[in-house]
Image (tube, rainbow, N blue to C red):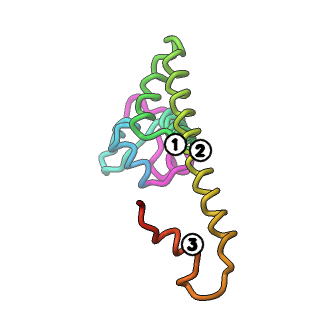
Amino acid sequence: MKGLVAAMKIGELAQRSGVGIDTVRFYERQGLLPKAQRLESGYRVYAAGDVKRLRFVRRAKALGFTLPQIGDLLALSDHRDDDMATLKRVASEKLVDVESKLAELERMRAGLQALVVACPGHGALAQCPILNALSEDDA
């Protein structure tokens, strides 16, 4: 097993990187993690660098990046001597996307707050402002 310094099996990799075993397999199928070498027994074995890579994926996912975007980020991270402008652009685009989603969530929250305040919480459902707002025809 050349190139496998501190080789580990999938369970140890999953534990050290903070993801589940099925997630490791999934990321491997998606190309976010290189295909593991296999022992004669069929067990996958991973290198210490795979822990770092999976932690990178986990952190990028927590920031809202999609798996294809994470693949792009990983490709960029493999070229550490390149200019950081591309990476900043990608992060800036993600920030705009997150801010847009936050604005939409704020709009939803305001609408729900208004409906909850308008509803007395007792009486016939036919008079419920929440139900009526959801049932309105868009004219």
Which mark sits nearer the N-terminus, 1 or 3? Answer: 1
Query: In the structure shown, which secondary structural element does the residue marked by tag 1 occupy?
Result: helix
Quickly name the residue at label 3: 130
Disc 1 target residue: 61
- First in sequence, mark 2 or 3: give its number: 2
> How far apart are the two marked residues, 1 and 2, measured between alpha carbons?
21 Å
Q: Is residue 12 magenta?
A: yes
**Disc 2 marks which residue?**
103
Please state which of residues 52 and 134 is positioned toward the viewer in this rendering. 134
**Eyeballing the image, is 58 above or below 11?**
above
Q: Amino acid at mark 1?
A: Lys
- Of tags 1 and 3, the one toward the viewer is 3
Q: Which residues are magenta?
A: 1-21
Which secondary structure, mark 3? Answer: helix
Q: CA distance from mark 1 to mark 3?
A: 35 Å
Sort mark 1 into few (<14), some (14-19) or many (20+) by Cα contacts within 10 Å: some
